[in-house]
Amino acid sequence: MLALRNLNWSGTAQVMCLMSGVCKAASTIGAVGRGAKPLDAEMLDGFAATLGTPVAVLAELTGVRPSAAPRDPGPEVVATASLIWEVRHLTWDQEAELTAYAQELGGP
């Protein structure tokens, strides 16, 4: 699901931290992705925010129990996840132009 959004392990780590507050190393996310490390409730929350998907849906798909107080993504997180989904259609040059424009507007 992350690859469909053109997110590698490093990109996923950055996006997950910004969108959910779940900050893990790219190597940890890669280990979960490869099945070398089990998915836990905290990471489930982070992936849900990154993908713009309700925690309950991912919990059902993965069989992982959600955290005691799962946080479904808020509207701003869902909108950001949607933007990430749409950016996958851009060419490398278009993405670079969009990044430069965002930085002009005061983005990171």
Image (cartoon, grey):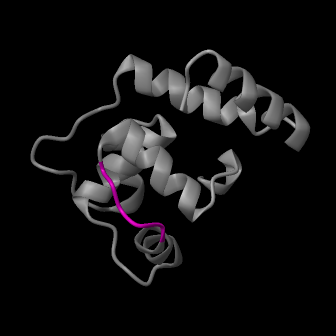
Q: Is residue 49 magenta?
A: no
Residue at the (64%, 25%) spot, across then down: 103
Q: Tell me where residue 107 appears, x and y as whole percent.
A: 55, 25
Q: Residue furthest bottom?
A: 36
Q: Main secondary structure of the magenta part?
A: loop
Q: Nearer the viewer, residue 91 or 3?
A: 91
Q: Nearer the viewer, residue 10 or 81?
A: 10
Residue at the (86%, 43%) spot, across then down: 92
Residue at the (67%, 56%) spot, across then down: 3
In the rendered image, the quadrant that contains the C terminus is top right
Indicate whether 61 appears above or below 50: below
Indicate whether 41 appears above or below 73: below
Q: Tell me where residue 33 appears, x and y as whole percent.
A: 50, 70
Q: Is residue 25 magenta?
A: yes
What range is drawn magenta here? 22-26
With 74 as the anchor, is 5 left or right in this view? right
Indicate whether 77 appears above or below 70: above
With 42 as the anchor, is 47 left or right in this view? right
Q: Nearer the viewer, residue 102 or 4?
A: 102
Q: Tell me where residue 105 appears, x and y as whole percent.
A: 62, 15
How many numbered circles are shown? Answer: 0
Indicate whether 87 appears above or below 5: above
Residue at the (40%, 37%) spot, across then down: 19
Q: Nearer the viewer, residue 104 or 6?
A: 104
Q: Residue furthest left?
A: 68
Q: Tell me where residue 70 appears, x and y as whole percent.
A: 20, 41
